[in-house]
Image (spheres, rainbow, N blue to C red):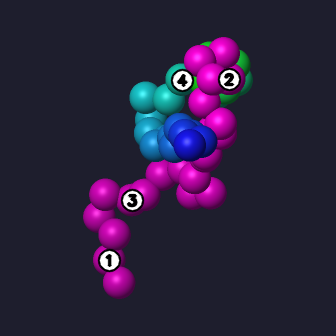
C-alpha cells in the first residue's frame, strides 16, 4: 500500500522543501499540496 501526506496551508506555514525531503526520507509515496492555500474565515455565498 502506498501512503502519502496531504498539506494544510496556514499562516503558520513551514518550509515545504524541508518537509518534502523529510517525507521522502521517511518513505512516503507522495506529498500533496492544495491549490488554494488559505480559506477565508468569513466566507459568504
Q: Which residue carries the number 1 mark? A: 44
Name the residue nearer the viewer: 43 or 17. 17
Q: Residue 14, labelled with which disc?
A: 4
Q: Quadrant of the C terminus?
A: bottom left
As drawn, the label of residue 24 is 2
State which tag comes first along the sequence, 2 or 1.
Answer: 2
Image height check: is 7 above or below 39? above
Other residues around mark 1 within 10 Å, as few (<14) / some (14–19) / many (≥20): few
Chain part drawn in magenta: 24-45
Magenta stretch contains residue 27: yes
Q: Are marks 3 and 1 in contact (CB under 8 Å)?
A: no
Magenta span includes 21 = no
Q: Nearer the viewer, mark 3 or mark 2?
A: 2
- Would residue 18 be seen by someone viewing this image from the given angle? no
Q: CA distance from mark 3 to mark 2?
A: 31 Å
Mark 4–mark 3 distance (CA, rounded to whole Å):
20 Å
Label 3: which residue? 40
Question: Quadrant of the image for the N terminus?
Answer: top right
- When the figure is inspected, residue 41 is found, relative to residue 30, above or below; the finding is below
Q: CA distance from mark 4 to mark 1?
A: 29 Å
The image position of residue 40, as x and y in percent, is 39, 59
Residue at x-position 31% and y-position 57%: 41
**Considering the numbered disc 3 on the image, is that residue within a helix, a strand or a loop?**
loop
Alpha carbon distance from label 3 to label 1: 9 Å
**Residue 43: x and y, percent?**
34, 69
Left-right relation of 17 to 28: right
Q: Is residue 21 placed above or below 32 in the rendered structure?
A: above
Query: SS for tag 1?
Result: loop
Numbered circle sitting on residue 10 = none
Q: Residue at x 65, y 36 (%)?
A: 29
Residue at the image point whose x is 44% and y is 35% from the top: 11
Amino acid at each position: 500500500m502506498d501512503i502519502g501526506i496531504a498539506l494544510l496551508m496556514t499562516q503558520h506555514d513551514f518550509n515545504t522543501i524541508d518537509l518534502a525531503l523529510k517525507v521522502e526520507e521517511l518513505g512516503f509515496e507522495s506529498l500533496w499540496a492544495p491549490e488554494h492555500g488559505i480559506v477565508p474565515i468569513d466566507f459568504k455565498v
